Image (spheres, coloured by chain):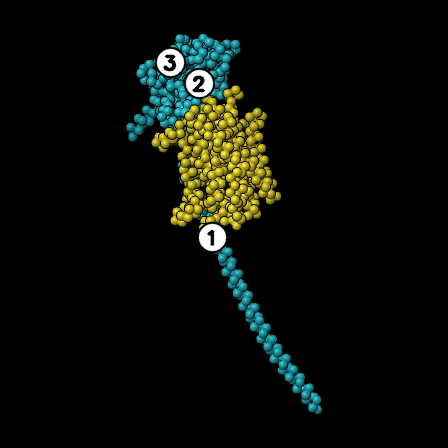
Amino acid sequence: MSDSAVPEKKWITPFNVFAAVVFVVSLPLIYLRWFHGIGSVTNLNQDVPWGFWIGFDVMAGVALAAGGYVMATAVHLFGMKEYEPVVRPAILTGFLGYVLVIIGVGFDLGRPWNAPHMLLQPGLASILFLVGLHVGLYCTTQFVEISPALFEWLGWKKWRKIAVSITLGATIFGVILSTLHQSALGAMLLITPTKLHPLWYSPFIGLFFFVSSIAAGLAMVTFEGMLSHKFMGYRVGIDQDRLDRITLGLGKATCITLGTYFAIKLLGVAHGHTWSYLGTPMGLWFLVEILGFVLLPCVLYLVAYREQRPKLVRFAAFITVMGIILNRLNVSFIAFNWQLPHDKGYFPAWSEFWISMLFVTAGIVIYRWIVSRMPILDNHPDYGSIH
Amino acid sequence: MSISRRGFLGGLGVSALAAGSTDAEPHTEHSYFEVPDERYGLLHDTTLCVGCRSCEAGCKEVNELPPIERPIGDMAVFDHERRTTDTELTVVNRYTVDGKDIFRKHQCMHCNEPSCASVCLVKALVKSPEGPVLYDPDVCVGCRYCMMTCPYYALAYEYSSPNPRVMRCTMCYPRIIEGKVPGCAEACPMGAISFGKRSDLLVLARDRIAKHPGRYVEHVFGEYEFGGTSWLLLTGTPIGNLGLGSLENVSHTPLPELTKSFLSIVPLVLTMWPGLLLGFYAFTKRRNEVSEEEARARVVEALMQADEETKTKLAAAAERAGKDKERAIAQAVKKALEEQAAKEGSDE
């Protein structure tokens, strides 16, 4: 544990006030949603069945929670021990991210209480079935992966030993599940060739989602490392210098991933012969996405790594995260239904944004509660590193 | 042997017959849904439709939905293109082509290979052998993936209900199995909607095209589109003019086929990933072990080398010490001799 003293508990902080406002305003919205239907709090319509909740809470949420499997693979499978300090925060973020995705889906489902039918009469031809099953299994796997921290906190040595002993198996299982459901989220759109704009529709869309999830995960870990250091500094087990070195390393990895992603996105355009769409308004929007939010951060990462500027890496990570969110929103409802007349279009209601903000805020509050108690950002003095 | 040959020839015969019949459909090897030839269908002939919306009223009546808001004959309803909703399972829209009003009825098309049913993760939507796609709200989880995937925008949702259902034309399944005609077809005063066996309807459609040259586009929409639909559409103008622009010249491949290549990757990943990842793990573990071993070996070597150097130094020191001693003795002897000589010299 860090030597610096735990700061005195102050309840009235700007963030706590913000969180309280978010929670209180959400209460009537939650009531409306469950007692007066989805339509009472969303702008969804008969042509647009998936809106901001699916695009942000689910599609972007799952991608941004990819840090868990990416870092676990790097450290536990590829032996990159220098990144060990960020594995537990990444897995915790991933786990909480998936829990919130599941709750978010619950809000969007019309009849979530029928979910057990998924196991009683599974629609095996449905890629959504694959996503649902894998998200559930992966959430459990991530709980197993993060459980050593819980057992260390509780002092349950025997349980901790068992949990640590299955780290390798859990990591491999997690990577398999992640590969499949990250790509499956994209592959769900394979069946909508007439509805998703040709620049986004591609037989490679599953691959696009998978590769971009790696970049999203890495960028989130970078971003989150900075935030933890800034706001939870008293718990962080490593100094700024080591964090900067980790940040630069993550930046290099994200740079390569984004470069690959950009290249395969171009391959998608070439494969689909959709160059002619680039000159249309939707084409310009596509260029904004892949030039401004994929190529630009890729170049920024490159410059940051060459000039050893961790701050620039963090800025590039921020743009990368925004780019992934933009891509998932595009696929879910902006580039989707692109041929519908504009008066039939969709723009999220403020209550849709608000409920999504509730999930993000709840995630931060729970994260803070856990890391201020359990050995996530630092090592427990009795155990140290698991390697 | 003979059986297998007869089976082989029989198979040939069937495919030859199918190729010769008017009901020839593109053969898809992988079918999610059984589509017997005896299934039902409906044909809408837009050249006979006058836009009276009796079908809408009939549909509302048999489905016990609130009656149509604007009365039959109120043409203002056509000012905006409408789509099906949770209370309007079928809608008629007006399209003006070359100054002429054309009316097209829209509803769930009841695909032969419905994408909505293939994407349903709880099998709440199923294709019945009789033709209609059926929906069971008691298992539906309300994910609305079916609505996302429907290329005809024919599914609607009860957004204002806390216990919402997907709402769509049922092709009047309960009436069909009772031997009755669907509500819309029964209500149509113009004979623009025909109900019957799908194969018979295709014959009827081709017959009309042949008998009235110039009246129809030589294309029965729904015969092959995405594997075909139970509702068929006979028009006098390309369907692009009738609000179906995104569906002109679409593939004959059923939509569920498009997800097959991805689904086939799943067992591959399940099989390959553990081996590959364990391989990587073993590789990095071995690499770490080797580097650790090498590091250890280097330490031992360094120690040994240090040891060796010490020995040499000691030997050298001993030698030096020995030499020093000899030199000291020699010097002492020399000194003594010199002193002796000096003494002897002073004595002389």
- Residue A319 shown left or right of residue B192 in the figure: right
Q: Position of residue A5 (x, y in %)?
A: 52, 48
Nearer the observer, B56 or A303: B56
Residue drawn at point x = 47 percent, y = 16 percent: B82
Looking at the picture, does residue B200 appear above or below residue A38?
above
Residue wearing tag 3: B61
Q: Which of the marked residues, 1 or 3, is nearer the chain's N terminus?
A: 3
- Residue A4 shown left or right of residue B194 in the figure: right
Residue wearing tag 1: B289
Pair 3/2: label in front: 3
Q: What element carries label 2?
A: loop
The quarter of the image holding the C terminus of chain B is: bottom right
How crowded pointer 1 is (Cα within 10 Å; few <14, some 14-19, many 20+) is rated as few
Chain of the residue displaying label 1: B
Which chain is represented by cyan in the image?
A: B
Which chain is represented by yellow in the image?
A: A
Label 2 with label 1: CB-CB less than 8 Å: no
How crowded pointer 3 is (Cα within 10 Å; few <14, some 14-19, many 20+) is rated as some
Residue B227 visible to the viewer: no
The quarter of the image holding the N terminus of chain B is: top left
Q: Determine which quarter of the picture holds residue A300.
A: top right
Q: Is mark 3 on a helix, strand or loop?
A: helix
Find residue B84 and name its label: 2
Chain of the residue displaying label 3: B
